[in-house]
Amino acid sequence: MEDMQESHPLSHQIIFKPEPHPLEAFSSSLRIQSGHEIDEKSHPPTHPGHVLMRRPWSLLILIAFGLPLHGDRTTVIASDHAAHALISQNCLDCHQGEDAESGIDLETLLHRTASTLAADQIPEDASAAWAVVEKVIKQGRMPPSGEGEVDQSTRQKFFDWFHERIVLRNGETQIGPTPLRRLTHYEFLNSLEDLLGVSVRPEYNFLSSVNVERGFVEKLLPVEVPGENGFVNDAHTMSEQPLPLLEYIKCVDFALSKINTSESSLEKQFGFRKLPNELPESKIRIIAESFLHRALRGKNTEKHTTQAVAAFQSAARHAGSLPAFKSMLRTILLSPEFFYRLEDTRSQASPYAVSDVELATRLSFFLHGSTPDQELLSLAAKGTLKQHDVLDQQITRLLNHPRRISLSERFAAQWLGFEDLISESDLDERGVPTINRAQYDELLYFFDELFRSDRSLLEIVESDWAYVSKYNQNTYGKDQFKPRQAFDSSYTNVLASRRRTGNQRKGIENIYDPPTLFAVTGERYGGVITSAAIMRTTSAPERTSPVRRGVWLLDKIIGEKLEAPKNVPPIDATLGSLPTPNPGKLDIIKAHTDMESCQLCHKDIDPIGFGLENFDPSGRWRTTYRDKSAIVSEGVLPGGTTFSSPKQLKRQLLDTYREKIVRNFIQRLLAYAIGRSLYPHDRVTVDQIYQRVVEGDYRCGVVIREIVRSQQFLCRQDNG
């Protein structure tokens, strides 16, 4: 029998903190806007909530009698009584004070909400906390079974209150404060390449005999940490990480060194294939302004031009025109305006439209992961980019570009985690093995096909087609697929150049062949859930984990993120309590999660996880474990639907969880596009996009276009 010992896959905990002192909040805001760290220990929070935690019922008495809080600063909002009624009667015994269960202090949360005026925005961490409360109440997980029932009328009053108070703001839709965004490493390198017309990363590796290795600049840059939105572009997380300026300087210098040998780059930057020894200042200014406009994304000023020309003139006193121009470009590329996506602000607490150049920047980094090109900037300068037909044309144009692959490389690979196959720290020292590359490419090509052919996002769960690598055919079995014709695509095949055909293969041995489009003929595969990449990344190296797979699917595909349980007994204790000497994996898991508190989550986790047990840790099909005991891939999903195979499981997932799967995809892509986590106030937009996606047959292109047309994408909002 396979070793069952493992850490629990649910490992995060939600902690709600009292609202900081206004000075601390200002310092935090300043830190986010400037990118500088503030020593928070020097600004200890001094909030009345700390006192109230020692006087548990003082707040409740004030609320119950509608008395004012904080003197004249604010008064209790009548609608908050709905939240108070439910929370005070059912939750405060366990969720108040420093020892609040699961770290959820609802007393302080009530206080923070009641002390916020109706016209003011509920702090985002408090808003997120209320979203957790709403979720567990809606799921029936709280109050716990046997500790009192909440009647439907009280529940509905709470849900109505949540929508009016947390989702809306003074009865109006909102988008929340727009955070300052910084370029990720990927965006930084893409921008360097596009601006300078050079390549700073290794060329595509066409050989299977040579492992893929990271280039100089990729090895140079520090590891980025995914943020709350699940991606490394999370603005709040990036604001807490120092800008790796020394590494960026080395990358800029490396990129500029490439200009020496690139006539096309020289012509792109300066209008000459060979620079003359002397140029008039007027020509230098024209070159500086042109590059500044592209590098600073339309945010350049006369001051920038003066500094750039001065850098050229200073270097020209001791060197020729090419070194002087490179010094000028270096000065521009090390400007804060290059690293940060600055936008004009109005200190306005309601949504307002961003400028055309700011929209061009948002659009390009969303769909290309790079700086806007000249066409986008020209349309922005004319003031026509926001026109519906013009914006729609630009979306189409950008999706027809090779940089479209960023949606698969950065969005999909980070969302589902298959980027781990080519970025794990414990990979072979010689680089990425071919089998890892093949499994990664199968999903890379799959997602690019979804976007390229504007296919249904439901095919992520189940499809009658797949990209299959010849290096994985023994894993899958040759009887599971057959060749098929290419789809009628909406956009260009941007991956075509990676495949060597005909004369391109002559004289070359061990050519790496990318995956090929096949029709699914068997009952085992289709979609991404049962791909080798996902089955491998959700397993331990030598054994599968039904719990890990179930948790992964609930989180990544369905959008149900679960909190880690407390006081889970060790596996050994469970084994000792079983009556049979050689229990099966299903028996062990059932016994290990037999507590009622465990079943709240495991009733959803276990059927899905065990439904995928036919796939071993490499994704290969199996019908027995190593001890020859039979694998039973059957179960019952919420609502009573049953399945007896992975194929049926995927079909039932689409029946049982369809709306959640669609909403989850929308929410993930929206969070990626705007660079932050979603909060309750984003629900109005998600609801609108969902309706249009359903009307549009769930096509991925509809999701992209509706996100671009959303208030969150077209507007910004400041603190208030």
Image (tube, rainbow, N blue to C red):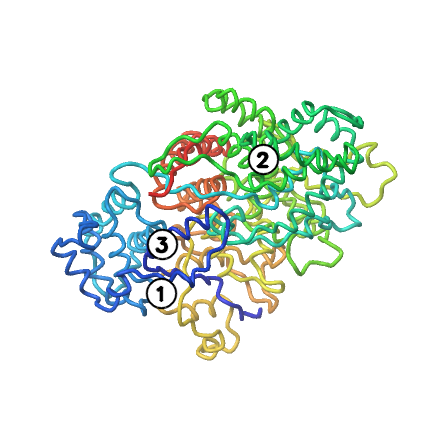
x 47%, y 36%: residue: 343
Is residue 48 at all visible to an observer of this figure? yes
Vertical side of 632 occupied by 482: above or below: above
Please report contact status of discs 1 and 2: CB closer than 8 Å, yes or no. Answer: no
Q: How many marks?
A: 3
Instruction: Determine whether, in the image, residue 716 is placed left or right of residue 75.
Output: right
Nearest the eye: 77 or 102: 77
Q: Is residue 602 shown to the viewer in this render?
A: no
- Write the residue at 35% across / 65% down: 102
Task: Compare residues 43 and 139 and report the one nearer the observer.
Answer: 43
CA gap between label 2 and label 3 equals 39 Å
Q: Earlier in the sequence, mark 1 or mark 2?
A: 1
Mark with earlier residue (1, 3)? 3
Q: Residues within 10 Å of mark 2 (few under 14, many from 20)?
A: many
Q: Nearer the viewer, mark 2 or mark 3?
A: 3
The image shows residue 413 at horizontal and vertical percentages of 58, 46
Question: Above or below — where is 139 with respect to 481?
Answer: below
Q: Which mark is residue 23?
A: 3
Q: Quadrant of the C terminus?
A: top left
Residue receiving disc 2: 368
The x, y position of residue 252, in whole percent, is: 68, 43
User: What element does badge 1 sit on?
Assistant: helix
The three-letter amino acid code for the residue at tag 1 is Ser
CA gap, disc 1 and disc 3: 29 Å
Q: Is residue 149 left or right of residue 220?
A: left
Q: Is 30 left, or right, of 492 in this rendering?
A: left
The amino acid beneath tag 2 is His
Element assignment for label 2: loop
Tell which of 37 and 502 is nearer to you.
37
- Horizontal and vertical percent for residue 166? 29, 46
**In the depicted view, which residue is nearer to us: 414 or 209?**
414
